Amino acid sequence: MGDSAFVPVANPAAELEGEMGRQVRAAIEAVLSSGNYVLGNQVAAFECEFAGFLGVDHCVGVANGTDAIALALRAVGVHPGDEVITVSHSAVATAAAIRQAEAIPVFVDIEPASRCMNPALIEGAITERTRAIVPVHMYGHPANMPEILAVARKHRLKVVEDCAQAHGATIGGIAVGSFGDAAAFSFYPTKNLGALGDGGAIVTGSAEVAGRARLLRQYGWAERYVSHVEGFNSRLDELQAAILRVKLCSLSAFVDRRRQIADRYREALLRDTSIEAPSEAPGCRHAMHLFVVCADRRDELRAYLASQEVGSALHYPMPIHRQPAYEAYGTTPEVLAATDQLYRRMVTLPLYPRLSAEQVEKVCSALQDWSRRD
Ligand SMILES: *Cc1c(COP(=O)(O)O)cnc(C)c1O
């Protein structure tokens, strides 16, 4: 790949270059001839290996990350009409999943530094209908789980972590996904661990929650053709599981590489006080899914980067409570002030493990040139 080319924000196809590509193709071939395509040995093996990677007892593969959140909520005992406290600064999937579980999202604001749920605001959002909290480890930065869990315990609320952007993130060396009653992962192709299609997983330390999730993902079947509860169809297929097994072997190295690139970007941004790089709270390991900076003249910065063949993106152009479908769940503007403040200033820079050193330097030079123009 020529480094004179445009640097994209993400490039999942690049992960298929070289040895990993050969292994992925071999894994696909093996599934093709196995005659088993949905919820078979590959899924079972991946569930074990991913649980092992995280250090959790149970993993249940499902069709995508949105389903993983929705089914996890049902599995921990969230019922239709219950309120679920979450953040508006997330992928819309977080709120869509809460609605899919027939619950009501209640948004609280974020901490500007971590860009994650502000634990101090949870108690003010609790009502007699509140049943659960869904913190999001946004961009790969862990939410403040110790404080969120303390509030949850005090009020007997369930916690389902949205780990869709945080494969490889830790707090005190412990993987996110092992703090709540359950957690949800997405394997959408651009995530830190990405399939070549859709995929997701629920992880939990509870055999009971895992058992319920297993029933829910396949028609409520406890045995073939007999539904014990009303269920859904949210199965992980063998091809995706086989691909994920190959890619899981490189996840740690890929997260290390993401962090290395992030460090280089931070260094390049050091002299420019008009652009704020993402921070990392003490004791936390940021999984660097996305490198999101804040800039006062965000749109001008993006135009300049594009002129230098450097891609950028907005994650996301609108917080959930500003999107037409979810306006009804919004509150008074002051309540989500930090969320509203952030989305006007943020911009995502190119970050993926197979960015070459030359591409990284190209991004750094563009950022430094922009700073010098001020
Ligand atoms: C990607 C994502 C999801 C949803 O995952 P899908 O696999 O696309 O359904 C949920 N939450 C967050 C924060 C995400 O980034």
Image (spheres, helix red, strand yellow):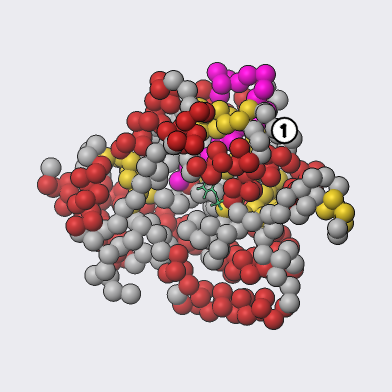
Which quarter of the rendering shows the N terminus? Answer: bottom left
Residue 353 picture location, percent across and down: 42, 62
Can residue 368 be seen by looking at this rendering? no
Instruction: Answer with left or right where residue 129 lies relative to residue 284.
Output: right
Along the viewing direction, whichever of 71 and 275 lies nearer the viewer? 71
Q: Is residue 128 magenta?
A: yes
141 is higher (above) or lower (below) than 191: above
Judging depth in this view, the residue of 267 and 370 nearest the camera is: 370
- Residue 189 at least partly seen: yes
Q: Which residues are magenta?
A: 122-139
Residue 255 in percent (x, y) is at 48, 57
Residue at 62% in and 80% down: 29
Along the line of sight, the residue nearer the viewer: 227 or 319: 227
Of all residues, the one furthest to the front in this rendering is 324
Q: Is disc 1 placed on a helix, strand or loop?
A: loop
- What residue is drawn where x is 43% and y is 26%? 336
As drawn, the residue found furthest toward the left would be 373
Residue 75's x, y, as percent? 73, 41
Within the image, what quadrant is residue 38 found in?
bottom right
Residue for badge 1:
79
Using residue 56 as the reference point, say whether residue 99 is left or right of it: left
Residue in view at x 59 percent, y 50 percent:
65
Circle 1 residues within 10 Å: few <14, some 14–19, many ≥20:
some
Tally the marks: 1
Quadrant where the C terminus sits is top left
Residue sitting at 36 percent across and 34 percent down?
342
- Residue type, mark 1 in image: His
Magenta stretch: includes residue 296: no
Q: Where residue 288 sits: x, y (%)?
A: 44, 50
